[in-house]
Amino acid sequence: MSRFDEDIDRVGTHSTKWDMMEKVYGVSPEDGLAMWVADMDFRPPDCVSSALQRMVDHGLFGYFGPDTAYRDAIRWWLDTRHGWEISPDWIFSTHGLVNGTGLCLQAYTEPGDGVVLFTPVYHAFARVIRAAGREVVECPLVMNNGRYEMDFDAYDGMMTGREKLVMLCSPHNPGGRVWTEDELRGLAEFAKRHDLVLVSDEIHHDLLMPGEKHIPMAKIDAGIEDRLVMMSATTKTFNMAGSHIGNVIIPDTPLRKRFGEVMAGLGMSPNSFGMVTATAAYSPEGAAWVDELCAYLDGNRRLFDEDVNAIPGVQSMPMQATYLAWVDFAGTGMAPEEFTRRVEKEARIAVNHGETFGSGGESFLRFNFATPRARVAEAVARLQEAFSDLQ
């Protein structure tokens, strides 16, 4: 039995995923399954829990410093896991990467500026952009042989000159794509043609299916260092989203100066709990845990896809990364209201609605299968029953 098979009751623990599902989706946690919010129903590795326990045992929770070990842990992880060498001086610590996105908007754009998104994409991007008074510019991804691709020729014709920044989600959420070197190079050239700051959110970069390899945007030799901002975090990889810690990594000195000024103007300082957990996670023990996790997630993916794809008219997009299945119900001929009703009311599963991810997501639902395998099996059995009239 894998450590990831442990059934941990999260109800009543202030878990957004489980304690908010009835309010948001009308699915009771008493008999429902939470497959929406992108956190996992798994404990983090023991090295993380032990580091927190040492903090508790010490009993004092003051300001964190010095942060040399924390920065070295990030540098070690990116080098050993992704082949990307960085300087510790390039790192800013933010309160998660949604916060990092907001800080980038403040640093590199003005109210009314356009921000380019390749949609459908992680819904928080558009929410933060609009809240900051910027304009969301949707460049729709193209479906080719069942997977998303970028069409830069089409996107060139959509630019007006008001766009100042482009956001990349790499690997892609919700499509599960690992972008190729050619695709990343195409994006780099697109950013240069339109004089855009390129922010690459790579929070899912460790969550790869076997045989897949993530390429950090910073490793693309395309002359974009003067416009590139990289973002990564331990929070998605190690299931520690509540620690609210993220890495914004900026190799270019002028870009780094502008970002630092925004952070200083907001009086931001790091969260000591997040820095302790990140330092512990980015370690050989943490790396071994991630390898075990990815193998387990691949098993869940295969189980989910095989049974969901057996439902006529339903297709789970082939995924290379993440633990978020992007399922298309267009082939059923049902309106979104009908297939969503069946999933939520009949199967009693809380899932993310596709339209919240922007243009192109209307016929989709997003399912989080980072949960014990028995729960995945229960979910697909419920889905097959809810759509049994199509069999």
Image: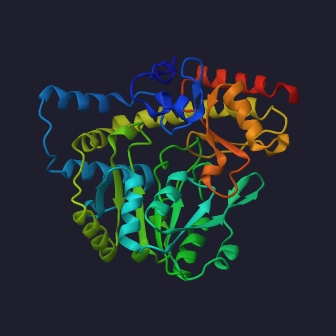
Which residue is painted at 47% across and 28% down in the image? 19
x, y percent for residue 380: 70, 26
- Vertical comparison of 191 with 384: above or below: below
> x, y (%) of residue 137?
58, 69
Q: Residue at x 35, y 51 (%)?
A: 246
Q: In the image, residue 153 lies at what x, y percent?
A: 69, 76
The quarter of the picture where residue 265 lies is bottom left
> Which sits in the foreground, 291 or 94?
94
Front residue (pair 214, 340): 340
How many marks are shown on the rendered structure?
Answer: 0
Q: In this image, 6 relative to 233: left or right?
A: right
Q: Nearer the viewer, residue 59 or 131?
A: 131
Residue 124 at least partly seen: yes
The residue under the point 74% across, 30% down is 342
- Does the rendering let one see residue 84? no
Residue 15 appears at what percent x and percent y? 43, 30
The quadrant the C terminus occupies is: top right
Left or right position of 263 against 207: left
From what the image shows, is residue 129 above or below residue 36?
below
Query: At x 80% / y 28%, what residue is drawn?
Result: 387
